Image (tube, rainbow, N blue to C red):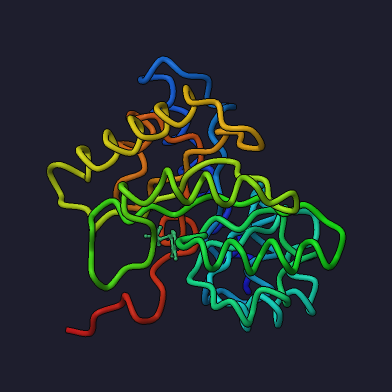
Amino acid sequence: MTEQEKIELRDRILAVQERIARAAEQAGRDPKEITLVAASKMNDAERVRAAIAAGITVCGENRVQELLEKYEQNAYEGADLQFIGTLQTNKVKYLIGKISLIQSVGSVHLGEAIAKEAAKRGVRQDILLEVNIGREQAKSGLLLEELDEAIARLSEKESLHIRGLMAIPPIADETTKNLSYFHEMRQVFVDILTKKYDNVNMDCLSMGMTNDFETAIACGANMVRIGTAIFGARPYQIVSP
Ligand SMILES: *Cc1c(COP(=O)(O)O)cnc(C)c1O
């Protein structure tokens, strides 16, 4: 990275932090309540390190192989590392011990695999349950009607700690910015909170990405996962003319 690229990265991070703070204040909330997770996929160890040097405190990766490679290169030193992508049960073993939170637990089956691996290592793994709020065929995640049973079953696992919910709604529409989905998520989050399950702490409501994070914050998100606005467009996002 050139010095100029580092300055640009720092400026983008500051701009995102400021937008988060403004959105929080507009919603009458303390900006400190909102955790910014830098979605660092496809950015190499050097860029991740530069982002951490510029103030990023949490990184989220969504491919196990890529995470392991960058982990070996000490990319995440000084930051908290989380997993936010689709996870196959046979890859869980590579993550336990390296990540603080698995945000993308979209099935009881996956939750059970994580519980088993965590128990084997004698640790308690924090997880978020991923909700397929847009009911999209191609997306993983629990449907709303499956959520209660998933919580009941996974909260029995002593090696798991359910810390909240995560959602990736459909690609944000420019005008509504997923407002109705975010509202619905907030409602579900509060419902679970009031049910006071044992072994469940509804601390995190993770929703909002580059195109819609301000709307998500307005609707109660306290964790946003942002890639493009921090690192710039990923190679496959750059459309050639
Ligand atoms: C890439 C990614 C993000 C961030 O997306 P941007 O639109 O680039 O901000 C958030 N969450 C998940 C799960 C991702 O894979």
Name the residue nearer the viewer: 27 or 204: 204
* Residue nearer the viewer, 68 or 91: 91
Q: Is residue 136 left or right of residue 8?
A: left
Question: x and y percent of residue 100 in the render?
Answer: 72, 54
Location of the N terminus by quadrant is: bottom right
Asked if residue 191 lies left or right of residue 124, the reply is left
**Residue 8 visible to the viewer:** no
- Numbered disc total: 0
Residue 179 in view, yes or no = yes
Furthest residue in direction left, as rendered:
175
Residue 194 x/y as whole percent: 47, 22
User: Which residue does the image show at 53% across and 20% down from the upper left?
Assistant: 30
Q: Is residue 25 above or below residue 102?
A: above
Left or right: 204, with 51 as reference point: left
Residue located farthest toward the top when viewing the structure as drawn? 28
Q: Position of residue 61 (x, y in %)?
A: 58, 67
Q: 150 or 90: nearer the eye?
A: 150
Residue 196's image quarter?
A: top right
**As drawn, 151 above or below 104:** above
Where residue 36 appears, as percent x and y from the top left, is 55, 44
The C terminus, quarter of image? bottom left
Q: Is residue 205 left or right of residue 53?
A: left
Tell me the residue at 32%/56% (across/down). Answer: 132
Q: Residue at x 64, y 58 (%)?
A: 82
Ligand 1 image position (quadrant): bottom left
Residue at x-position 43% and y-position 65%: 232
